[in-house]
Image (cartoon, grey):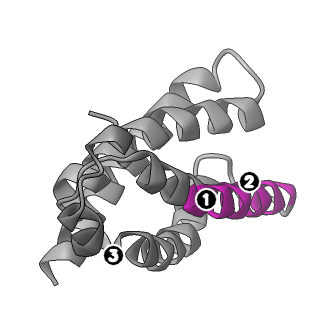
């Protein structure tokens, strides 16, 4: 339960970063590009906080690969749903909120799988593959 709470807090902050960058950038560039830039900025923040705080794990290259894979799926969900919602007439400030209602639970399930072997990974010396 504590892990899910940390995931939600981290996800909320990440979503806030994503949304804030999107709202700022959409004033200057096309909204789909602004949305993607916000996603990338929040991704970097999210990876490190997910490792250190949510799952209490060191950031390693393998975790980055797994995290990235989960976010490829997550990104596709974001882009497809965002595009569909805006085409269907949902306001461009509301569409991201609706996207998150689908993307967040999906991403949590994928990341639980990625981090489930945390203890096994940390028993060995994987410092060479650490991102620290």
- Badge 3 or badge 2: first in the primary sequence: 2
Residue at the image position 52 percent from the left and 60 percent from the top: 66
State the residue lying farthest toward the top. 28
* 31 to the left or right of 111: right
Residue annotated with mark 2: 79
State the residue lying farthest toward the front. 125
Of residues 113 and 22, the one nearer the viewer is 113
Q: Dot 3: few (<14), some (14–19), or many (≥20) neighbours within 10 Å?
A: few
- Could you say which quadrant of the image residue 11 lies in? bottom left
Residue annotated with mark 1: 69
- Badge 2 or badge 1: first in the primary sequence: 1
Magenta extent: 69-87
Callout 3 secondary element: loop
Callout 1 secondary element: helix
Q: Position of residue 26 (x, y in %)?
A: 65, 26
State the residue lying farthest toward the bottom. 1
């Amino acid at each position: 339960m504590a892990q899910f709470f940390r995931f939600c807090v981290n996800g909320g902050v990440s979503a806030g970063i994503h949304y804030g960058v999107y709202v700022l950038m959409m004033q200057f560039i096309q909204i789909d590009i602004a949305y993607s830039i916000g996603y990338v900025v929040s991704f970097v923040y999210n990876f490190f906080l997910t490792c250190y705080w949510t799952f209490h794990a060191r950031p390693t290259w393998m975790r980055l690969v797994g995290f990235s894979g989960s976010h490829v799926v997550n990104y596709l969900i974001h882009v497809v749903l965002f595009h569909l919602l805006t085409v269907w007439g949902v306001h461009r400030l509301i569409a991201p909120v609706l996207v998150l209602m689908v993307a967040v639970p999906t991403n949590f399930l994928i990341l639980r799988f990625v981090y489930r072997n945390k203890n096994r990974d940390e028993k060995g010396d994987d410092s060479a593959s650490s991102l620290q």
